Every structure is written in C-alpha cells, then in structure tokens.
Amino acid sequence: MTPRTRVLLGVTGGIAAYKSPDLVRRLIEYGAEVQVVMTAAAQKFVTPLTLQAVSGRAVRYELWDSSAEAAMGHIDLARWAQIILIAPASADFIARMAGGRADDLLATLCLATEAPITLAPAMNRLMWANSATQANIAILVKRGVRVLGPAVGMQACGEVGEGRMWEPANLAQNIMESSTNAGLLAGLKVLITAGPTRERIDPVRYLSNRSSGKMGFAVAAAAREAGAHVTLIAGPVQLPTPASITRIDVESARDMYAAVHRHVAVADLFIAAAAVADFQPVTVASTKIKKQGIAIKLDLEPAPDIVKSVAEKATRPFVVGFAAETNDVEENARGKLKRKKLDMIAANHVGDGIAFDCDDNALTVLWAGGKAEVPRGPKIEVARELIALIAKRLPPAATKRRPPRP
Ligand code: C5P
C-alpha cells in the first residue's frame, strides 16, 4: 500500500474556518493523512473536537502542552508534515508569519518546517486589499510560500469582493495533485539548469536557441513539491520563479558553468535541463559590427560542457542530463549517457510539435541497464514523473555523494 501524503492543516481565526471539517474530509478522500493544528482564534469558529472527529487525530493547538509534546514535539510535527496548508489564513496569521514570529504552535511549525507551505487567505475584502496585508503576502511569496486565492464573491460580512477562501474541493484538489511525490526528495539539495544561453557576438547581437525554459522550471517546481531545496540556474527566460526556489539568472554558457560550479559542491542531485549553447564566439566585438555588404565569418569555439564537467568531478551528485534529438532518440541519448558519464538521461524527440517552446512534452528516460517512457502530457506532470524515476534510482543517503561512474 502506498503511504498516505502527510498534510498538516493549519486553521486560523476566520469565519471560513467553518469549512475546515469539509476540507479535512476532502483531503482524506484524496488519500491524505491530516493533522490539524489550530490557533487560539480558530477555536472561536470551529471546535477542536469536530476537527478531531473528521481527521481521526487529536488536534494540536498548544505550544506548551507537555502531554502532546511528549507524544510528538513541535519539531517532530514540523518534520512529520510533507505539505503544510493554512486554510483559512487570516490577516493576523499572515502578518505573524511574515514577521517570522514563533508565538504559537502553528507559527512555530511554519518556521521549523522544510515542507512546502501553501496559504488560502480568507478575510474581509478591505483587510485583504490593505497595503499592510499585501506587503506581508509579498514577503511570503518572495520566501516561496504558495498562495491560493482569495476568491471574489459574497462575504460573510455582507460585502462583495476579493476575500473568500477557495472552496474546500478546489483546495484539496490543488494540494493533492501537487503531492504525488511529497517527501520523495525531502531535505535533499537539488541544482537545476534551465533555459537557453546567449553567447554575445557584439554589444547588440547574440547566438541563442528556442528553448523556453519551461521544462527545467517544471522540473524545479516538481523537485520542490517533492521536498527538495532547489537552486535553479536559469538562462534568459520570461518565466515566473516557482515557489520556494532559489533562482540565479545567468546569460552565457560560461556564466552558467561558473554558477553551477559555485553551487554544485553541496548538491545531492544535479539536473541539467538547460539548452546550453554548443558554440560561443571566440571573441566578442566591443562595438557593433557594421554591415559592409559582404559576408563575414564568425569564429566559434566549443562552449564548456557543464553537465559533463559535473559528472567528471571526483565527488559529485547524482547527475541527470537531457537530450533533445530529432532522430534515433534512444541510440543518441544512450551515447550521451555514456560519453558524459551521466547517471540518467531524459530524452525527447523534438520537431513533433512537442518539447521546444510549448507546454507539452514526452520523455524516454534511460540509465545504465534500464529505461522508462513518460507519455506525452503537460510539462509539470512529465516533470513529476521524471522526479519519481530519479528518486527511485538515487543511491541511499550515505552513498549519495560518490565518484564518477567508470
Ligand atoms: O550534447 P547535448 O547538448 O545534446 O547534451 C545535452 C545535455 O547536456 C543537457 O543535459 C544539457 O543541459 C547538457 N549540456 C551542458 N553544457 C553544454 C551542452 C549541453 O550542460 N555545453
């Protein structure tokens, strides 16, 4: 039997807390094990007994409850959670979280956890629109907290506007669909490259390619959902940063190489999804090259092979490469797996209206002596399947950092 996803549901003080028992029930229907933690204010709206009855677990609300702490202390509770969902999240709780407070059990858990945190705000529309609340939300989003809602509609106070909690069914679906790999990479450090690189020719021109970066960003989001600490080194792309991820923007293959080598020493897993340039101009003209009506020649040299340089390190993480092929996908990708000393390679067939510059992908994933097909689907779903395949092949913690394959 597959273990159930461990969701810690934080309930804070707002009228929408009356929907929390329904939310618990729906999370359980999706296969979650739910531990409810309430703030003092939440208990004015819904009783711990109700939430205990629907969750099947004693509700926690006291930081200083020695009998509860003896069973599972607050730090254990923070570790137990694979996902934290705060619904409803009140203006006060959002402010306390933005301030990094640890003045009750729920706020303390949010500080002490490595699990991804999602907020479902619910409050009067003016409280939500208030610049204090918006500034607090901006702080939390910047720190990687995911925010679902609020929705627009009729409010309990009789006003109409933005401030309603997302409906329990939508919250449960969103949380559980992104939880398929919850905890699979818990606590691991994952370094990912994504997007194209730009190789300058002169101050206004460059060589690049059509990579959108979407696959690499989806892999980064999927790794974070699986509990990893993710550093994403991105070439020039127009994509929002996935929640809870450290992003480093670079331009050229050389910049990407340098950034990767600055961060790889602590990584347990390196996923090279970037479409790094294969060639770079030998020299970059310091002024714009003038057209003179005649052909010009560009001298190009090989760009550094980033993934190969990581795989060849004496101590190195588990290394996963990508291969975009137009023909003989498996044969070419297997060649790359060996030549670059990778542990795994994810190959896709480009030119079928998938992979490059679009939202769908399909992969053939290869490793020494093995293979798996990931069928066509949205990149985030394909990325989740890839993360699950990687997690299965990752060496146990003690041997994670090891010498290159012979
Ligand atoms: O050789 P090819 O470019 O097809 O290999 C693709 C794989 O190698 C990808 O994982 C890509 O990120 C990585 N790569 C790299 N540095 C390069 C070229 C490719 O890391 N200069």
Image: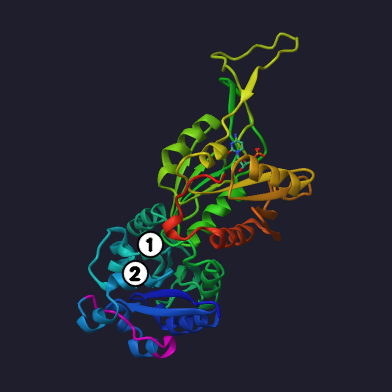
Name the quadrant containing residue 84.
bottom left
**Residue at mark 2: C-beta within 8 A of ligand 1:** no
Judging depth in this view, the residue of 120 and 264 nearest the camera is 264
Q: Residue 273: say if magenta.
A: no
In the picture, which quadrant includes the C terminus? top right
Amino acid type shown at disc 2: Ala
Residue 153 coordinates in the image, percent (x, y):
50, 71
Judge from the rendering whether residue 264 lies leftward or rightward of residue 107; answer left or right: right
Name which of mark 1 and mark 2 comes first in the sequence. Answer: 2
Q: Is residue 60 above or below residue 125?
A: below
Q: Magenta stretch: give its range.
A: 53-63
Residue 290 coordinates in the image, percent (x, y):
65, 11
Q: Is residue 252 visible?
A: no
Which residue, given by chain and number where applicable, does mark 1 sit on?
114
Which residue, given by chain and number where applicable, does mark 2 sit on?
78
**Residue at mark 1: C-beta within 8 A of ligand 1:** no
Q: Secondary structure at mark 2?
A: helix
